Amino acid sequence: MTLVEEPRTDPLPRAGAEILARAQSLAPRLRERAEEIERARRLPSDIVDLLRDAGVFRMAFSHAWGGPELTSIEQTEVVEALAYGDASVGWCAMIGSDTGLYARFLDEAVAKEMFPSIDMVTAGLLFPTGRAERVSGGFRLTGRWQFGSGITHADWVVSGAFIQRDGQPERDADGAPDSRLFMVPRAKVEIIDTWHTTGLAGSGSCDYTITDIFVPEEHTLEFATVRGETGPLSQPEVHMRNMPAVPLGVARAALDYARAESVAKADDYRLQVTIAECEADFHATRAGVYAAMRRQWEILSTDGTLDALTPDERAALPLSRLHAFRTARSIVQRLYDLRQTSSIYRPSPLDRWLRDTNTMCQHIVAQDRILQSAGAHLMGGAPGFKLCIGLVR
C-alpha cells in the first residue's frame, strides 16, 4: 500500500472510491503507530489531520453542502479500511464522521452556521444522562456523560438529556420522560480523564461534563424530526449503520496477520482448520452486514421508508451489527490461541486486537438488548431499544 506522506494541496475527494482509496493507503501507517496511539489514549493531532485530509469526516455531508454524500455502504467500507490499520482510529472515524448526519436533523440555516466547514468533528453520548431545564429561547444543560469517543479532537459535542420545566420532567406523547439531543461547542465542555481501559485505549473516550450551559432551541435535535434534507441518510438509526466496520476491519487484520505469521506451519492440521473456520465466519458475517445495508439502501433510495422493509429485513440490520462485533471477538480469540505464547509478546498485535474487540463488545450494539429488540420486532412484541430498528415512538 502507498502511504500518505504529506497533506494534500489539491481538492479533497468527492467520490466514495477516492476516500476509500485514501483510507486504505493510511492503514499501514496507522498499524505502525498503533502502540503510540494506545499509549497516548487519544488520536495524535497529525493522525486527525490525515483523516480530515482524506475526507473521512465529511463523508456524510450532502452534495448540496459540497460534500461527497457517501452511501451507508461506502461509509462502512471507509471505516473498515481504517480499522484494519488501527481499531481506535476506525472507532473515532466512525463517530466523528456523523456530523453530516446530524446536520440533517437541524434547520439548514442553523446547521450552516454551526458547521462552516464540512470537515468538522462531532463527539458525545446520545443516551439521555443529563438534564436540560427549559428557559426562554432554549435550555440550560447540565450533566456528566461517559464514552465521549473522539472528544479530545472534536469541534462539537452532542449529548442526550431529559427535559425539565421548573425542575419537573416533561413528558412525551406516550407519557414517558421527554428527552432530546443537545449540540454544544467543544470549548464549553470539560473533559475528565477517565479513559484508562482494557481496549480501544486510543479513542480518548473520556467522561465529560457540561455545567449550566445555555443551548439555543435551534441547537437541539430529535431523530424523529428531519429539518434538513430528506433521504436515505435522514433516518433515525443512520448513525449506527457503519459501526460494524470497526470489528470487521480488526478481524480482517487479525486473519491476515495470523496467516502471514504462520506460513512455516502451512501443513499443520490445527492451523488449517482454525484459519478456515475463522475465514468462513468472517466472510459470512461481513456478507450479512453488507447485504442488510444494501437492501435497506435499495428501499430508502427509491423514496421508501424503513416501514417498507419486511420485519425480517429490518431486524437483519441490528442483528448483523451485533453479529459482526461478537464474531470478530471470537475470531481474534481463536487466532490468539492458535498463535499460543507468541501472541503475548510485543510486537505481536494480537493482544491489542483481543483487548480492542473485548472492549467494543461492551457497547450496546453488541448487547443482548439488541437481540431482545430484534426478536420482539420479529414476533410483534415490544422492543426494549426501539432506535436500533429505526423506531422513535
Image: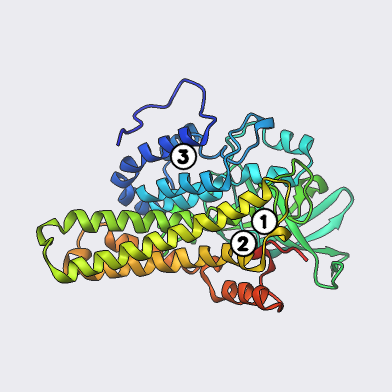
Q: Is residue 163 visible?
A: yes
Q: Which residue is mark 1?
A: 159
- Name the amino acid type tagged 1: Ser
- Name the amino acid type tagged 3: Val
Q: Which residue is mark 2?
A: 145
Q: Is residue 357 above or below residue 378?
A: above
- Give the quarter of the figure containing the N terminus: top left
Front residue of this view, candidates 201 and 59: 59
- Name the amino acid type tagged 2: Trp
Circle nearer the viewer, 2 or 1: 1
x 45%, y 65%: residue:
325
Circles 2 and 1: CB distance less than 8 Å? yes
Q: CA distance from mark 1 to mark 3?
A: 22 Å
Q: Residues within 10 Å of mark 3 (few under 14, many from 20)?
A: many
Q: CA distance from mark 2 to mark 1?
A: 8 Å
* Label 3 SS: helix
x 80%, y 45%: residue:
218
